[in-house]
Image: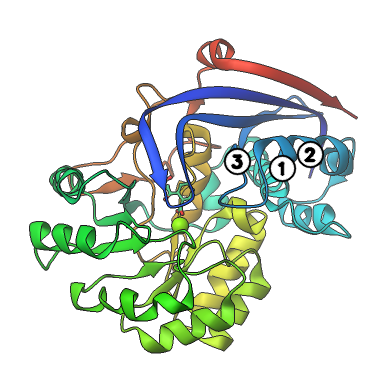
């Protein structure tokens, strides 16, 4: 039971160590939307909205999310007594389509708040059992195959358990082939196209088959489920869906249509933890592996993803890179770390998010704030 009587929104700018390029755009400074939820009894928690600055990955952006939270979603929570966080997704979604990242920021925040109030770890509140999470790295598109090989070898040396290579039509087979040759047959590698291809590219994409990829992520457009099914019939490489899976219903469609064999669950993309858990459960029953993707989160968002990824069917390495992969300094203490075996420990022994947020640092990075009250 909780009652939130104030929500503060804040945009901070976090400089990436290096630009991150995917097929649909490049990012050098992460505009991060942070929220703080304040409970009537005095408890509070930080949360993060993963919406990007530009609508290339999703229709949502940080600016649409800000508007949606202020105008439509925060008013449904503020001043309302809520029994438990598993009721929040329905509360926010009734008669409002889309805006999943805005919904998720609040919904996940209420799970975080509940964990803080009950003084238990967010992972245990969600039902997470795993203690150390195998972690993958997502490597942005590089100028040459040689530069990508250099990054991939460094990632293997650092212990990463999975190497994801961003590709696009002008930079794909040759790049992946160079990495496979360099890392050898035993390293798990995959590619992510962020929807850059069409079904006409099926024969071209089939050239990936001999490179033994763990999966090919989102080769076609988010809504192209039937064409993805056709592509999957023509490829040996398992398809994994990211942008396509915006809710439980889409996950069920994927299973029924056989247009993918793996799901990348990003809780922001699907509207929060409740739908994430439902997708996790449906996939587990259908023997579909899932893994937790990333959206260049700060250490706050990472806390939520690590907790989710501790559920049992997150059986493939997640994009849970430690803080130092992206940031000169993260906004949380301790920073998120990965050991030499490529494992990120789940802070089961620490209550709430498991990290302290560095408010002083955040104040210095803040470019705008807004207070929403009951
Ligand atoms: O497609 O998974 C993606 C980052 C921004 C937008 C889309 C994607 C990504 C990543 C980054 O791959 C993964 C990470 O946060 O480490
Ligand atoms: Mg992806």
Residue at (33% x, 58% y) in the render: 170
Label 2: element kind: helix
Where is residue 221 shown, x and y percent of the image?
Answer: 55, 67
Choose between 351 and 289: the one closer to the eye.
289
Disc 1: CA contacts within 10 A as few (<14), some (14-19) or many (>=20): many
Question: Which badge, 2 or 1, is on the more N-terminal residue?
Answer: 2
Q: Which residue is mark 1?
A: 106
Q: Is residue 35 above or below residue 149?
A: above
Q: Give whichever of discs 2 and 3 has the lower sequence position.
A: 3
Residue topped by disc 3: 54
CA–CA distance in space, label 1 to label 3:
21 Å
Looking at the picture, tell me which residue is in the foreground, 139 or 337.
139
Label 3 element class: loop
* SS at badge 1: helix
**Residue at the spot 34% in from the left edge and 70% down from the top edge:** 215
Residue 326 percent across, percent down from the top left: 36, 33
Residue identifier under label 2: 69
- Check if mark 1's residue and mark 3's residue have beta carbons within 8 Å: no
In percent of width and height, residue 242 lies at 51, 63
């Amino acid at each position: 039971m909780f009652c939130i009587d104030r929500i503060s929104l804040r945009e901070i700018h976090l400089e990436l160590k290096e630009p991150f390029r995917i097929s649909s755009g490049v990012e050098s400074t992460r505009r991060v939307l942070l929220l703080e939820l304040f409970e009537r009894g005095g408890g509070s928690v930080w949360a993060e909205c993963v919406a990007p600055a530009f609508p290339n990955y999703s229709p949502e952006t940080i600016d649409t999310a800000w508007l949606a939270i202020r105008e439509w979603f925060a008013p449904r929570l503020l001043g309302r007594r809520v029994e438990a966080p598993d009721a929040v997704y329905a509360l926010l979604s009734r008669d409002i389509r889309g805006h999943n990242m805005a919904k998720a920021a609040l919904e996940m925040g209420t799970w975080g708040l509940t964990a803080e109030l009950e003084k238990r770890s967010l992972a245990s509140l969600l039902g997470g059992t795993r203690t150390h999470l195998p972690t993958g790295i997502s490597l942005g598109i590089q100028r040459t195959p040689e530069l990508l090989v250099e990054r991939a070898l460094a990632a293997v040396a650092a212990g990463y358990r999975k190497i994801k290579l961003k590709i696009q039509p002008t930079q794909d087979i040759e790049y992946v082939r160079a990495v496979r040759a360099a890392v050898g047959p035993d390293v798990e590698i995959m590619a992510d196209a962020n929807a850059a291809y069409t079904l006409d590219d099926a024969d071209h994409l089939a050239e990936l088959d001999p490179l033994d990829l763990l999966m090919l992520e989102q080769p076609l457009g988010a809504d192209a489920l039937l064409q993805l099914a056709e592509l999957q019939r023509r490829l040996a490489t398992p398809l994994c869906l990211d942008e396509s899976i915006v809710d439980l219903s889409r996950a069920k469609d994927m299973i029924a249509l056989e247009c993918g064999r793996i799901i990348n669950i990003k809780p922001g993309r699907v509207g929060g933890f409740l739908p994430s858990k439902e997708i996790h459960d449906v996939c587990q029953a259908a023997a579909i592996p899932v893994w937790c993707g990333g959206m260049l989160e700060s250490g706050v968002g990472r806390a939520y993803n690590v907790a989710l990824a501790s559920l049992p069917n997150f059986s493939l390495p997640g994009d849970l890179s430690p803080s130092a992969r992206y940031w000169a300094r993260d906004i949380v203490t301790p920073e998120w770390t990965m050991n030499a075996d490529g494992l990120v420990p789940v802070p089961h022994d620490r209550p709430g998010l498991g990290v302290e947020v560095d408010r002083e640092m955040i104040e210095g990075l803040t470019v705008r704030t807004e207070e929403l009250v009951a």
